[in-house]
Image (cartoon, helix red, strand yellow):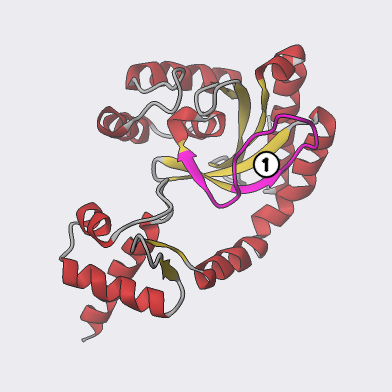
Amino acid sequence: MAKEQISSILRALQILECFMDHETEWTLKALVDQLGLPTTTVFRQVSTLTDRQYLVQDPVRKSYRVGPRLMMLASSIMGQSDFRQLARPELERLSDTVRETINLSLLIDHDIFYLDKVETHRSIVCNTKVGSRAPAYATSSGKAMLSEQSAAYIEEYCGWMRQNAKSLTANTITDPERLRGELIQAKIQGFAVDRGEIEIGLICVGAPIYDINRRVVAAVSISGPDYRMQEDWETMVREVQRAAENISRLLGCTMT
C-alpha cells in the first residue's frame, strides 16, 4: 500500500513537472504521450490535481494549465528562499550600476531556472519571467554554469543536445561541438555570452556563483539590447563578474 502511494505521488510530480517546461498548457493526450503512462492513470492524477486547484482546465480547449494553489505554493517558497534574499541587494546594486535587467538563475536538468530578476526602467527590456525556464545552451547564465561542470556532465549534456536542441533564433547554438568551444572560452574568461541566441537583438553576459566548497550553484547575468550592451562592454563584463564574486563571498566562497 505504501509503495502504491509513493508511486502515485511520483506520477503526480511528473505531471506537475511538465508545467515547468516551455509549454504552459497540456491536453490529456499530450501528457500521456509525454510521460508514457496509461491514459486512465494520467486522467486520475490530473482530475485530483484539478480538484485541489493545483491545475485548472480550460472549459473550451479542455487543456490544463497551472492553477492558483500551485502558484501560491511556488510564490511562497520563492519568497522564503534564503539564497534569493541573500543575493537580492547585490542584484539591485548591479542594476543601479549598469541600468539593465539583471537575472539570477539556477541550473536544473538541461535548463536554467530564473530565481530572481531586477527590472530596468529603460526602454527595451528583457522578457524573462521569475519562475520560468530557458535552455541552458542558449543563455549566458546557462553557459557560465555548464562551463564549471565535470567532463562527464558536459558529455551527457552534449549527448542530450544532439537529440533535443532547438533553435530559438537564427543565432542559437544547437551544435554540441560549438557549445563545447563556448564552454571552454567561458571557463577561461570567467564569464559567458549570449549573442541574440534566445531573443534577437538581446545580448546577455553571465558569470558563475560559487558556494563555500567552490562548487557552482547559480549565475548572475546582465541583459540588454545589443547597441546598449556594446557601448560599454568592458563595464558590463567587469560588473557582472564583480556581482558574482560578491554573492559567492556571501555564500562563504573565498575568491582567489
Q: On screen, 201 above or below 14?
A: above
Location of residue 43 in the rendering, given as x and y in whole percent from the top left corner: 25, 71
Residue at 27 percent across and 80 percent down: it is 5
* Left or right, residue 19 beside residue 44: right
Q: Is residue 229 visible?
A: yes
Density class for disc 1 (Cα within 10 Å; few <14, some 14-19, many ≥20) is many
Magenta span contains residue 199? no
Location of residue 198 in the rendering, given as x and y in whole percent from the top left corner: 51, 29
Magenta span contains residue 119? yes
Q: Is residue 254 visible?
A: no
Q: On screen, 80 above or below 104?
A: below
Kindly report the secondary structure that dominates the magenta region of the rendered protein.
loop
Foreground residue among 131 and 29? 29
What is the quadrant of the N terminus in the image?
bottom left
The region drawn magenta spans: 115-134
Location of residue 140 in the rendering, given as x and y in whole percent from the top left corner: 55, 28
Q: On screen, 148 above or below 249?
A: above
* Left or right, residue 106 beside residue 158: right
Q: Which residue is mark 1?
A: 248
Q: Looking at numbered disc 1 in the image, what kind of residue is underneath it?
A: Ser
Residue at 51 percent across and 16 percent down: it is 185
